Amino acid sequence: MSEKNREGKRTARERLAVERERQKAADKRRRALIVGASVVCVLGLAAVVGVVAANAGMDDGSESSGPVVGPSGAQGKDGLAIPVGKESAKSTLTVWEDFRCPACKSFEDAYRSTIHELTDSGKLKVQYHLATIIDGNMGGTGSRNAANAAACAQDVGKFVPYHDVLYRNQPPEIEDAFAKNSKLLELAAKVDGLDTPAFRKCVEDGTHNSWVDKSNKAFQKGGFSGTPTVLLNDKNIYQDQTMTPAKLKQMVEAAAKG
């Protein structure tokens, strides 16, 4: 084996060891917070701050070629946001997320029902931005492929249910299961009406891959500390350790009343 190959393998092992230690520390902090808040079932937005700090993300060098094709209905600067909720809502939640990111899953699991309630009632609109920082940190293409598949689901009006399915079935961070289109299609079968020939072609062709890459570059240029980054009316509420689903609901409802 060449010295270059040995060095490459050693670097990969060291990176994996660091990642494992970081995840252990994050899990320990998460367990401590959950135990401390178990009486009132509160999960603070900063529960997994250890994961966030490590998820600054770097370009993994696997940038897609081809034209930038945004999903149907994409909004915002350069058409990089997938909108959910009524445009007339007085509050806007901006979420930068990565489908491979454990901290993003923790946020979704804690806030999913509250966000659904507020968007369904017309009090909140959400702008989802997709990033691929775990691909950059850990290697692989699962973040990008899952984001492309979610964009494909947006094309047929199924973004929200597929988005939720992806997070509910998120693999361990070091397992790049979402890199396999077969896995993404398997999960699509859990969403009524999504698993169609058009959706399959979109996923397998990577129709929105270049759009996902462009979204990730916007994340990198945004100066954010990691994923998830959650902004309520441009205020970063993910950094607020007192934030809870109940507090978010209270803030949105207060804004709705004017």
Image (cartoon, rainbow, N blue to C red):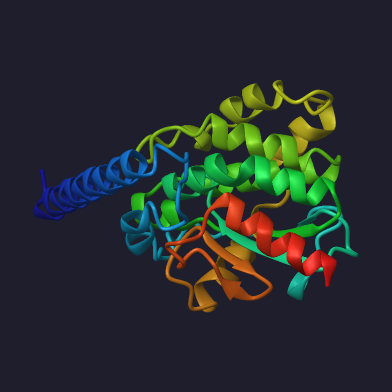
In what quadrant of the picture does the C terminus appear? bottom right
Answer yes or no: is residue 64 visible: no
Residue 142, image x, y percentages: 50, 42
Residue 157 lies left or right of residue 133; in this view the side is right
Residue at (86, 40) in percent of width and height: 156
Residue at (53, 53) in percent of width and height: 244
Question: Which residue is the extreme one toward the front?
Answer: 39
Residue 177 lies left or right of residue 111; in this view the side is left
Image quadrant of residue 54? bottom left
Residue at (85, 41) in percent of width and height: 157
Viewer-proximal residue among 73 and 127: 127
Question: Which residue is the extreme one toward the right?
Answer: 88
Answer yes or no: is residue 38 visible: yes
Viewer-proximal residue among 241 and 199: 241
Residue 158, image x, y percentages: 80, 38
Viewer-proximal residue among 61 and 157: 157
Residue 161, image x, y percentages: 73, 35
Image quadrant of residue 73? bottom right
Residue 121 lies left or right of residue 19; in this view the side is right
Residue at (46, 41) in percent of width and height: 40
Q: Is residue 79 above or below residue 161?
A: below
Residue 154, image x, y percentages: 79, 45
